[in-house]
Image (cartoon, rainbow, N blue to C red):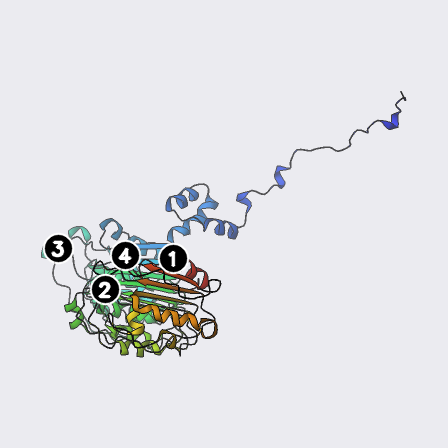
């Protein structure tokens, strides 16, 4: 055996491992404030935000503003309604928090004196009047004490000494001022604890609002909202308004939100009449809107009846509308005459910009007695990507053999088509559409036909071969009684991929 020599032995490693230098390590507390703000922005639960804020002062400084990201006022809930005054007080004391409020939900509020309302304190009244003055809600040329004196308030009310049954009427108002409404009445209502002036003040002092949601707006208001047009921040960040009126409150609703619709960044608008009765529909004229144009791209309207007056007011002022959905939500009005030519004239004003058009008059519980229901040709809608409508709107009255051809009224730009309330009369139209699809409708990717489900009629034949090329056009045939509220999952998936921005 060969003798081992020293140079054949493995050499001892000269590497040395030292303990980590803890002083050079970077931990979460060492992260920049901007990084912490980004991390904590993913917190959605109030309890998680609270627990994070309790870790240390640095975490508290980044997490605390998230409490103000969303604000919800529920006037029908006494506990939540009580947060309105403290919240405004906090915003006034800490103006830097005002820009943190991005989403505001206002669910009902009072416009008159109620027994359970609380008079605000003298200190809050002075602070609120001062904030309203700076926001141009009240006359900015007058000092706070002068505004309060002009309102007839010389001895401020002690909240603990109020007897609501024997409470005197507010002093007589002193007339309109340059602020656009009655300053005296505004201050009087503020002092008595009425919520409407505080709601107006809240909107005026929050410059960072991105979305506003109104639900169950009161049917009557005593104050003008026009002064919101002159607030310093001009609602420059407002992008989304979602509004549902109380049963009889449609006119008051429009008078309130109408002054917010000129926001330069506004993109989405949802308006519902909240299920008005027919008596209210016939007796109430829509509130005129003093607007030159609306910058919105997405508009959704839900009405109890096919009343196109309000729709006309809004749509005719739009300049770049890309999405329009109009739905009638009460199918019991079967005797109402539908002025479809008027509807067609309204949507024709947006023929150059509309990409997504959805129309539904809801025949789920019976057919309306319709006259002149056909919309007519839509071929001049050159940018229309998706169309959703009931069969009778496209081809004529129900239970009658259509006299119009579907392929002759559709724009060639369509990628998706959804037809609701269909019957067997639609079949020859689909066959004709398939025959010219590769040439006249080369962009078509999806066709969804929802047949009306009615126990008194024969079940529609959903197995008829239509002749569409399966590799290019996805065809969905279904029986759907709740169209368009319950869309086919395949249609929903296609919409989310094709037009995610809408």
Q: Name the residue under label 3.
A: 164
Q: Mark 4 points at which residue?
A: 124
Q: How far apart are marks 3 and 2 (CA)?
A: 18 Å
Mark 2 element type: helix
Q: Can residue 209 be seen in this view?
A: no
Mark 4 element type: helix
Residue drawn 55% across and 45% down? 30
Nearer the N terminus, badge 2 or badge 1?
Answer: 1
Give the camera-side residue of 328 and 237. 328
Nearer the N terminus, badge 2 or badge 4?
Answer: 4
Q: Distance between the residues labelled 2 and 4?
A: 12 Å
Nearer the N terminus, badge 4 or badge 3?
Answer: 4
Nearer the N terminus, badge 1 or badge 3?
Answer: 1
Q: Mark 2 points at which residue?
A: 187
Mark 2 nearby-residue class (10 Å; few <14, some 14–19, many ≥20) = many
Is residue 375 left or right of 336 when viewed as pictured?
right
Q: Distance between the residues labelled 1 and 3?
A: 35 Å
Mark 3 nearby-residue class (10 Å; few <14, some 14–19, many ≥20) = few
Mark 3 element type: helix
Is residue 30 left or right of 141 when viewed as pictured?
right
Q: Where residue 389 sits: x, y (%)?
A: 32, 68
Say if 50 sits above or below 372 in the image.
above
* Label disc, if present, on residue 101 of the rendered structure: 1
Q: How far apart are marks 2 and 1 (CA)?
A: 25 Å
């Amino acid at each position: 055996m060969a003798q081992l020599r020293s140079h054949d032995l493995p050499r001892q490693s000269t590497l040395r491992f030292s303990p980590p230098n803890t002083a050079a390590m970077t931990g979460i507390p060492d992260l920049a404030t901007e990084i912490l703000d980004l991390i904590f922005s993913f917190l959605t639960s109030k309890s998680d935000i609270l627990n994070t804020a309790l870790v240390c002062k640095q975490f508290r400084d980044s997490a605390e503003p998230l409490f103000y990201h969303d604000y919800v006022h529920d006037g029908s809930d006494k506990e939540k309604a009580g947060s309105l005054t403290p919240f405004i007080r906090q915003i006034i004391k800490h103006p830097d928090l005002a820009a943190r409020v991005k989403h505001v939900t206002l669910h009902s509020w009072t416009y008159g004196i109620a027994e359970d309302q609380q008079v605000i304190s003298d200190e809050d009244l002075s602070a609120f009047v001062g904030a309203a003055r700076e926001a141009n809600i009240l006359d900015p040329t007058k000092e706070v004490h002068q505004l309060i004196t002009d309102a007839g308030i010389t001895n401020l009310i002690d909240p603990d000494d109020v007897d609501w049954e024997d409470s005197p009427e507010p002093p007589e108002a002193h007339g309109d001022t340059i602020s656009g409404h009655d300053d005296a009445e505004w201050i009087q209502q503020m002092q008595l604890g009425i919520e409407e002036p505080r709601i107006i003040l809240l909107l005026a002092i929050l410059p960072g609002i991105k979305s506003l949601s109104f639900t169950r707006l009161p049917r009557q208001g005593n104050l003008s909202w026009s002064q919101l047009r002159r607030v310093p921040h001009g609602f420059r960040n407002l992008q989304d308004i979602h509004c549902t009126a109380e049963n009889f409150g449609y006119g008051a609703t429009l008078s309130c939100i109408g002054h917010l619709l000129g926001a330069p960044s506004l993109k989405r608008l949802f308006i519902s009449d909240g299920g008005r009765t027919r008596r209210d529909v016939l007796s109430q004229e829509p509130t005129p809107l003093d607007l030159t144009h609306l910058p919105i791209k997405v508009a959704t309207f839900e009405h109890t009846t096919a009343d196109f007056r309000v729709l006309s007011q809004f749509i005719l002022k739009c300049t770049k509308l890309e999405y329009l959905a109009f739905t009638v939500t009460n199918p019991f009005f079967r005797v109402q005459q539908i002025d479809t030519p008027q509807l067609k004239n309204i949507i024709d004003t947006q023929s150059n910009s509309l990409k997504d058009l959805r129309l539904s008059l809801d025949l789920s519980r019976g057919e309306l007695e319709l006259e002149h229901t056909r919309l007519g040709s839509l071929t001049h809608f050159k940018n229309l990507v998706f169309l959703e409508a009931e069969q009778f709107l496209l081809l004529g009255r129900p239970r009658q053999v259509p006299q119009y051809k579907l392929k002759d009224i559709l724009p060639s730009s369509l990628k998706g088509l959804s037809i609701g309330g269909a019957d067997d009369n639609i079949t020859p139209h689909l066959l004709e559409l398939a025959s010219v699809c590769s040439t006249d409708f080369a962009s078509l990717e999806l066709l969804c036909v929802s047949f009306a489900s009615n126990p008194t009629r024969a079940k529609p034949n959903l197995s008829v071969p239509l002749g569409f090329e399966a590799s290019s056009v996805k065809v969905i045939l279904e029986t759907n009684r709740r169209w368009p509220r319950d869309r086919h999952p395949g249609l929903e998936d296609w919409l989310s991929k094709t037009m995610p921005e809408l």
